[in-house]
Amino acid sequence: MSSASQWQPVLEAALAVRSRAYAPYSHFAVGAAVQAKSGAIYSGCNVENASYGLTVCAERNALFQAIAAGEREFSILAVVADTPQPVAPCGACRQVMAEFGVDIIVLANLAGDVLVYRLEELLPAAFQGGNDKI
Ligand code: THU
């Protein structure tokens, strides 16, 4: 399991980018950051739209920023929001994390509560393609 010294910089990046969330409809600002195996950290916030279904979550935004920068392998993803318990990523984002094999997911809130999971715990038996068998 990842130690605090490993995920702390990723969580700090998630906290910083949360201030850039575009959430005029839900007023729920989310920040996420992902560390690639290269060591580089990429950030993303949620971006909403008047057509609500077009909204992109912070987690997928961070991952897509990293993919566009040429990264393909990831170690840690952190996500933070102002929730009573550490914020739980939506199912769509869990599936995208599974696509790229994120090892460790750090969930946090502004109160400083932190939960650390392996992806397999958040999305057991993930769909892995058309020939997947459970
Ligand atoms: N949201 C995220 O960015 N990440 C999550 O893990 C949960 C939900 C966003 C989407 C939308 O902009 C707002 O939070 C309310 O659902």
Image: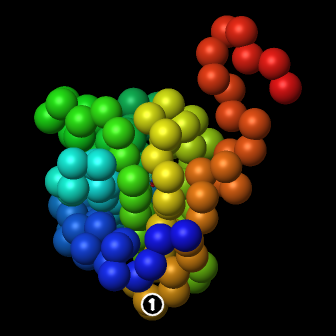
- x 18%, y 54%: residue: 40
Reading the image, the residue beneath label 1 is 111
Question: In the rendering, at what x and y percent does residue 119 appear?
Answer: 59, 51
- In the picture shown, does residue 64 fall above or below 84? above
Q: Position of residue 43 (x, y in %)?
A: 23, 54
Picture residue at 29% right of the left edge, 67% below the top? 10
Residue 122 falls left or right of residue 2: right
Q: Is residue 66 above or below residue 41?
A: above
Q: Residue furthest right?
A: 134
Q: x, y (%) of residue 87?
A: 53, 68
**Mark 1 neighbour class, 10 Å CA radius: few under 14, some 14 to 19, many 20 or more:** few
Q: Position of residue 117 (x, y in %)?
A: 60, 64
Q: Is residue 33 left or right of residue 93?
A: left
Establish if 80 lies above or below 47. below
Q: Using the image as rendered, state which of residue 113 and residue 48 is in the foreground.
A: 113
Give 112 or 106, whichever is nearer the viewer: 106
- SS class, disc 1: loop
Residue 21 visible in the shown view: yes
Q: Quadrant of the N terminus?
A: bottom right
- Type of amino acid at the residue the image marks with label 1: Ala
